Image (cartoon, rainbow, N blue to C red):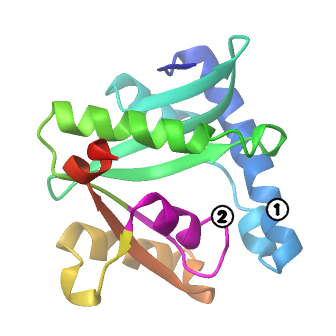
Amino acid sequence: MIRATVPSDLPLLQDIERAAGAPFAAIGMTAIAEDDPPSIETLREFADDGRAWVWADAGVPVGYLILAIVDGNAHIEQVSVHPGHAGRRIGRRLIDHAARWALDRALPALTLTTFTDVDWNGPYYQRMGFRYLSADEETPGLRAIRAAEAAHGLDRWPRACMRAEVAGWIAH
């Protein structure tokens, strides 16, 4: 079940992020697997702004999504599901929820940045209906996000921006 993130969830979201990152080590992306999750303060900001949701199983978060507003679109900052709950469409349901949230606020699209060559990243989002953006289509805010990611070392592996129109998403 999807619900708004509450303060007591925040440490659990960090645990989910660590667990969800672990499979990156198996594909040679150890730096991603060992990367720190968002801070409690960062997660609290998203929650306080009403842009953080969890998927709870028996009341305990097993997945989460946080959104930013970037250039007038709902930008998925992070969506993670604990590997013990993978394959249950939890990530998809969280993204569906984000699309409805964006539609209610007249935001035209969902955007995200992702690894292009990781099966559970770019190809997964593409199967869901996101499309890769060309460099010319990237908005200033997305370019700034990509620059910050590059400064953090994420460009050691191919990355891209993706977009899905909210109206088309809801029509699925």
Answer whether residue 30 is magenta in the image.
Answer: no
Residue depicted at 64% across the width and 35% down the height: 63
**Residue plotted at (11% across, 39% down):** 106
Q: Position of residue 140 (x, y in %)?
A: 19, 73
Above or below, 149 relative to 64: below
Location of residue 51 with respect to 61 vertically, above or below: below
- For badge 1, the amino acid type reads Pro
Q: Residue furthest front?
A: 172
Q: Secondary structure at mark 2?
A: loop
Badge 1 or badge 2: first in the primary sequence: 1
Please state which of the two labelled residues, at mark 1 or mark 2, is closer to the viewer.
2
The label shown at residue 23 is 1
For image coordinates 62% across by 88% down, the residue present is 156
The answer to whether the residue labelled 1 contacts the one labelled 2, judged by CB atoms less than 8 Å apart, is: yes
Above or below: residue 7 compared with residue 148: above
Mark 2 belongs to which amino acid? Trp
Residue that carries the numbered disc 2 in the rendered image: 120
Q: Which residues are magenta?
A: 112-130
